[in-house]
Image (tube, rainbow, N blue to C red):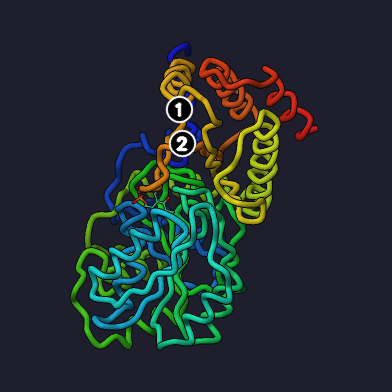
Amino acid sequence: MKNRKLLMIPGPIEFEPEVLRAMGEQTTSHVAPNFIKSFGKSLSLVQDIWKAPNGQAFIVAGSGTLAMEMAVANIIDVGENALVINTGYFGDRYKDILETFGAQVTMLEAPFGETIALESIEKELKTKKYKLLTMTHVDTSTGVLTDPKPIADLCNRYKVLSVLDGVCSVAGEYIHQEEWKLDIVLTGSQKAIGVPPGLALLVASQKAIQAWMDKKFNGRNYYSSWKEWLPIMQAYAEGNPSYFATPAVNLIRALEVSLNQINKEGVDVRIERQHVLARAFKKALESIHLKWVPKNDKITAHTLSAIYYPEGLDIPKFHKKMKESGVIIAGGLHPRYAATYFRVGHMGAITASDLFATLGALEQALHHGNHTFNLGLALKTFQNELK
Ligand code: PMP
């Protein structure tokens, strides 16, 4: 397949052929017995993968942003306080969403490539009564990994609901929703979950559902409302037909296939596999003098790499050569620093061969853009790291 491209951006990613084949199956009615079974099974697999046996799963047609909206629009009342932990572009988005629903938002914004210290979060939580806190597990604009557990601990101590944007982390970074007492963990289908774009997925704790029930002011949201979706999810989980808005039948079949694959491999085994590859990829590019946006290894995501252009690189030449190689990577996304770095996604069905191909193409393109290094060293380092 000489024109085949390798999609190495941080979502959408390369998908398993079996998942893509499921997308192409004949579409059935959304109330057909086989579809009800697929939907019910997917809901239960989502709970397994999130490690939230008592949580309420929602699977709705839409993208990750709908999941972000659904998570907060059902909980926050007009005038209530929300705290946004911002480690990049998607923190800004959460602020916008929350303000759309009338929240009073305070944002703790980390410097580019860094996280927020726990002490600063606690100090802020002491200043007033917050209804909820949002954090981005992996901010796709910076590649920064936030440790959600200690923040969720703080939220529990201060009686604040915690919302984890896991769009770039679920099934790619470790998550134990229930053990870590996270109230909502959300994602989109197109990243480490391994299904083409179009599904918003989230799991809400019983505490979050109770907060929604206690909410005084309802009705500012419609398509994202739990009033509409909760009975639908409950019906499908119990094997009964139901309708509010037509589910994405083919995507949900593909989701069932992908979640089954993840479950079969074991979610933690799968996550570890991605982490081993991510660490080796980082060592490989560091060996040819490239630097990462996240300030240290502890806060470096495993689902994508955000890498500074080396000094003196002819950036247009570099990207032209990458394009010719057929390996698709992404540019920067952070509004202020986008021109200084590029991004490579490596999650889900990723294999060592994909990263060999990517490293080979990157070496060629960097060489072409006049970056000086020992050609072949990144590939050799990668080999050695995986030995
Ligand atoms: N949050 C994060 C961390 C993301 O990476 C993205 C998508 N890149 C979103 C939210 C929004 O998801 P979507 O583009 O599917 O709406």
Are the residues at dot 2 and dot 1 in contact (C-beta closer than 8 Å)?
yes
The residue at which mark 2 appears reads as 9
- Residue 194, how many percent across, how many down? 48, 43
The residue at which mark 1 appears reads as 328
* Residue type highlighted by circle 2: Ile
Q: Is 191 drawn above or below residue 216 in the view shown?
A: above
Q: Nearer the viewer, residue 18 or 272?
A: 272
Question: What's the distance in space between the residues labelled 2 and 1, CA to CA?
Answer: 6 Å
Q: Quadrant of residue 356?
A: top right
Label 2 beta carbon within 8 A of ligand 1 = no
- Residue 177, how many percent across, how many down? 55, 69
* Residue type highlighted by circle 1: Ile
**Residue 207 visible in this rendered orientation of the protein:** yes
Left or right: where 65 falls relative to 127: left
Disc 1: CA contacts within 10 A as few (<14), some (14-19) or many (>=20)? some
**Residue 203 visible in this rendered orientation of the protein:** no
- Residue 355, how many percent across, how many down? 61, 29
